[in-house]
Image: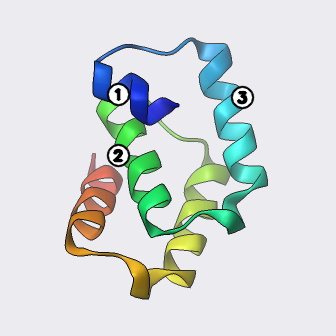
Amino acid sequence: TLWAFATLGLQPSKALTAGMMKQAVAVQGDFNAQGIANTLWAFATLGLQPSKALTAGMMKQAVAVQGDFNAQGIANTLWAFAT
């Protein structure tokens, strides 16, 4: 959902963003490499700061699936963390 907003250049509501962050933390272990890259890219593109819990969860899950990242996913993830 946040990826779609970022792709369209639309700003999601604060309530939607908060709800998506909360749910992402709850299911962080289910994220694959592309999901991590897309989620972090969306936050960075939208100029939003993910919560500390979400950032920590995405970093932990990225390590768990690190062998599944392609070059674009690595670039997007690193760019998002740097932004």
Q: What's the image's color scheme?
A: rainbow
Residue 10 placement (x, y as % from top left): 36, 13
Is 28 displayed left or right of 61 in the figure?
right
> Looking at the image, which is closer to me, 5 or 62?
5
Residue bearing mark 2? 41
Neighbour tally class for label 3: few under 14, some 14-19, many 20 plus, Cα within 10 Å: few
Percent coordinates x, y for residue 70 in the rendering: 28, 75
Question: Within 10 angstroms of label 1, few (less than 14), some, or many (20 or more) residues?
Answer: many
**Residue 9: x, y in percent?**
29, 18
Describe the element under mark 1 as helix, strand or loop: helix
Image side of residue 68 versus residue 80, left or right: right
Q: Within the image, what quadrant is residue 17 found in? A: top right
Residue drawn at x 42%, y 37% as measured from the top left: 43
Please state which amino acid type lies under the numbered disc 2. Trp
Q: Amino acid at mark 3?
A: Gly
Residue at image point 50% right, 15% down: 12
- In this rendering, is residue 74 above or below 43? below
* In contact (CB < 8 Å): disc 1 and disc 2: yes
Q: Secondary structure at mark 2?
A: helix
Image x and y of residue 27, in percent:
74, 56
Q: Is residue 67 above or below residue 40?
A: below
Q: CA distance from mark 1 to mark 2?
A: 8 Å
Residue highlighted by disc 1: 6
The crowding category of the residue bearing disc 2, from other C-alpha atoms within 10 Å (few below 14, some 14 to 19, many at least 20), is many
Three-letter amino acid code at the position of disc 1? Ala
Decide which of tag 1 and tag 2 comes sooner along the chain: 1
- Give above or below for 51 relative to 70: above
Q: Residue at x 55, y 55 (%)?
A: 55
Give above or below for 52 relative to 66: above
Q: Residue furthest right?
A: 26
**Residue designated by label 3:** 19
